[in-house]
């Protein structure tokens, strides 16, 4: 009797919510998205540091005052990058529980692409800011 009751409950649940993914699947997908975002952000941080070091090696500042101004700009850029990355991490997800797995994956991919594009635009802005600062000689 107990076994039949359990089977009936499971059958009823599967009929009511056939399109809903298992809770573990959502957690795994979310963890994967967070990991991919963190990895992308680490790459952007590395790119910024490399840009800054390369620019400093190609055209070193002529005096201590210019070097200090450039160092302050670079530190400010790193803080701005960290702020943008924090906003990306806490941004609400666009996926809804009623979305199917394909829709959730597509939305997650769009969010990753948007974050990547924002990072690239920010790196280009930082590079041009640094170039203008260097050209003020």
Image (cartoon, grey):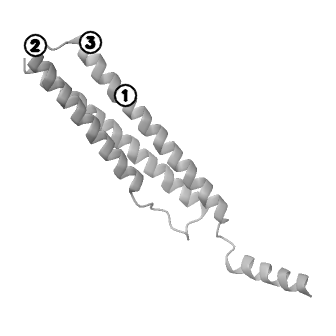
Callout 3 touching callout 1 (CB < 8 Å) = no
User: Which is more N-terminal, label 1 or label 3?
Assistant: 1
User: Most extreme residue toward the left, as rendered?
Assistant: 137
Image position of 11 (left or right of 99): right
Which residue is nearer to you in this view: 133 or 17?
133
Number of other residues with Cα within 10 Å of mark 3, as a class: few under 14, some 14 to 19, many 20 or more = few
Q: Is residue 41 left or right of residue 59?
A: right
Name which of mark 2 and mark 3 comes first in the sequence: 3
Residue 67 percent coordinates (x, y) = 15, 19
Task: Answer yes or no: is residue 137 visible.
Answer: yes
Q: Position of residue 94 (x, y in %)?
A: 45, 62
> For this rendering, which residue is in front, 65 or 93?
65
Q: Secondary structure at mark 1?
A: helix
The residue sitting at 45% across, 60% down in the picture is 93
Q: Is residue 68 found left or right of 91 in the rendered image?
A: left
Q: Which residue is mark 3?
A: 57
Q: CA distance from mark 2 to mark 3?
A: 14 Å
> In the orientation shown, which residue stands out farthest toward the bottom?
1
Residue at position x 9%, y 20% in the image: 65
Displayed quadrant of residue 23: bottom right
Figure check: 24 above or below 51: below
Q: Earlier in the sequence, mark 1 or mark 2?
A: 1
Q: As displayed, is residue 100 above or below residue 73?
A: below
The residue that mark 1 highlights is 47
Residue holding disc 2: 63
Q: Is residue 62 above or below residue 118?
A: above
| Measured Cα–Cα span from mark 3 to mark 1 | 15 Å
Residue 92 position, x and y percent, is 41, 61
Residue at horizontal 7%, vertical 21%? 136
Q: What is the crowding at mark 1: few (fewer than 14 residues within 10 Å), some, or many (at least 20)? A: some
């Amino acid at each position: 009797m107990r076994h039949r009751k359990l089977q009936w409950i499971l059958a009823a649940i599967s009929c009511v919510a056939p399109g809903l993914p298992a809770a573990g699947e959502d957690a795994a997908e979310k963890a994967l998205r967070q990991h991919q975002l963190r990895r992308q952000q680490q790459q952007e941080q590395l790119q910024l540091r490399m840009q800054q070091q390369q620019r400093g090696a190609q055209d070193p500042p002529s005096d201590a005052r210019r070097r200090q101004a450039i160092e302050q700009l670079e530190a400010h850029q790193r803080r701005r990058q960290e702020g943008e990355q924090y906003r990306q991490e806490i941004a609400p997800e666009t996926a809804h529980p009623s979305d199917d797995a394909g829709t959730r994956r597509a939305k997650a991919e769009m969010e990753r692409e948007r974050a990547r594009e924002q990072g690239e635009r920010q790196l280009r802005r930082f590079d041009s800011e640094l170039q203008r600062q260097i050209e003020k000689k």
